[in-house]
Amino acid sequence: SFSRKLKETNGVLGSSVLLECKVSGTSPMSVAWFQDGNEIVGGEKYEISFLDNICALKLNALDVTDTGPYTCVVSNEAGGDVCHSLVSILGTHHPDPLGYSSDVKIGEPLVLKCQIGGAPEIKVSWYKEDTKLRSTQAYKMHFKNNVATLAFSTVEDSDIGEYTCKAENSVGFFVMKVNDLSVEKGKNLILECTYMGTPPISVTWKKNGVILKHSEKCSITTTETSAILEIPNSKLEDQGQYSCHIENDSGQDNCHGAITVLGASSSQYNIISSAVISTSGSHCAILFCCCCFVLFFLY
């Protein structure tokens, strides 16, 4: 069975993401990965590993086709289990113009369409040359089902020019911060932060202001989108103020929480906290796309 399951993951086009989950069970154990029900074969694009009961799938050179559901399947003689993740891709995308014809006549209606891909929230703008357009009685703008449209009621001489559709989605905000929490003595602590930003991102964990390092007592796992701090068999001395600091070339961010260890004992896992952190001003974590139309008219 899975002691730590997959989570939804966001990646930037052209970069890499790492999907990880942790299993418990008797060896030997087989692991298989699937995207949309199709089994993934390891190689340069997909790096598959299974070490210390951690199943990992690294997706390299991300493109829009990597968006979708992923499944990890583990099994041994005793049975099997599955867990799932949804991968979304952020970054540059060049949409395809739809339904465009260069044979436009004065006085006739016209609709320019643009197919856009990316994660929400997506903001769409239309430009004529360098001037941003706004809906008027002469033309209306809509965005539905990932298709942006600019509809002219009738084309006039003044409408001749180059039109551009631009779409963007900005990334960079806290979804949830770490809270002050308590855990029983003897339980395993798992502190986890999930973040988005332009790689490389450095991660630093601290307890009471002192930097923590990976060791037998304190296990630290870091990927391009998450950081996990695990402390097995917690003791009273493990309580204190914990913080996670992330930083890249565009900025930095922090989250923290006070952890209290109570006197009772138990052998089960206790997930202390989960936080989602975004680096502020991450300049490459922006969906930017555009398609251009040049209007010519027939008289």
Image (cartoon, rainbow, N blue to C red):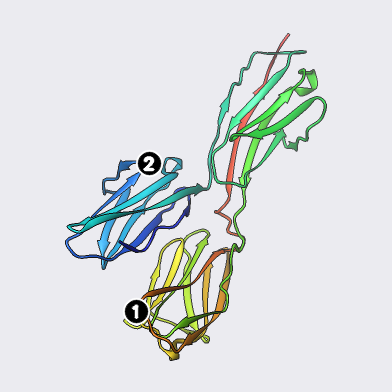
Label count reads: 2
Q: Calculate the distance from the C-alpha at mark 1 to the C-alpha at mark 2.
A: 37 Å
Instruction: Give the class, few, some or many, for how many residues have Cα within 10 Å of label 2's Cα (few <14, many ≥20).
Output: few
| Picture quadrant of residue 78 | bottom left
Amino acid beneath label 2: Asp
* Residue found farthest to the right: 137
Q: Is residue 168 left or right of residue 18?
A: right
Q: Is residue 125 left or right of residue 204?
A: right
* Residue found farthest to the top: 299
Q: Nearer the viewer, residue 242 or 123?
A: 242
Q: Earlier in the sequence, mark 1 or mark 2?
A: 2
Residue under label 1 = 267
Q: What kind of element bears circle 1?
A: loop
The quadrant of the rendering that contains the N terminus is: bottom left
Q: Nearer the viewer, residue 26 or 115?
A: 26
Q: Is residue 98 shown above or below 21?
A: above
- Residue visible at 77% across and 20% down in the picture: 153
Q: Is residue 260 shown above or below 53?
A: below
Q: Is residue 71 left or right of residue 159?
A: left
- Percent x, y for residue 213? 39, 81
- Residue visible at 44% across and 68% down in the picture: 227
Instruction: Give the class, few, some or many, for how many residues have Cα within 10 Å of label 1's Cα (few <14, many ≥20).
Output: few
Q: Is residue 37 shown above or below 157?
A: below
Amino acid beneath label 1: Ser
Mark in the foreground, 1 or 2: 1
**Contact between labelled residues 2 and 1, with CB atoms less than 8 Å apart:** no
- Percent x, y for residue 122? 62, 44
Q: Is residue 114 shown above or below 270?
A: above
**Disc ID at residue 36:** 2
- Residue visible at 35% across and 49% down in the picture: 71
Q: What kind of element bears circle 2?
A: loop
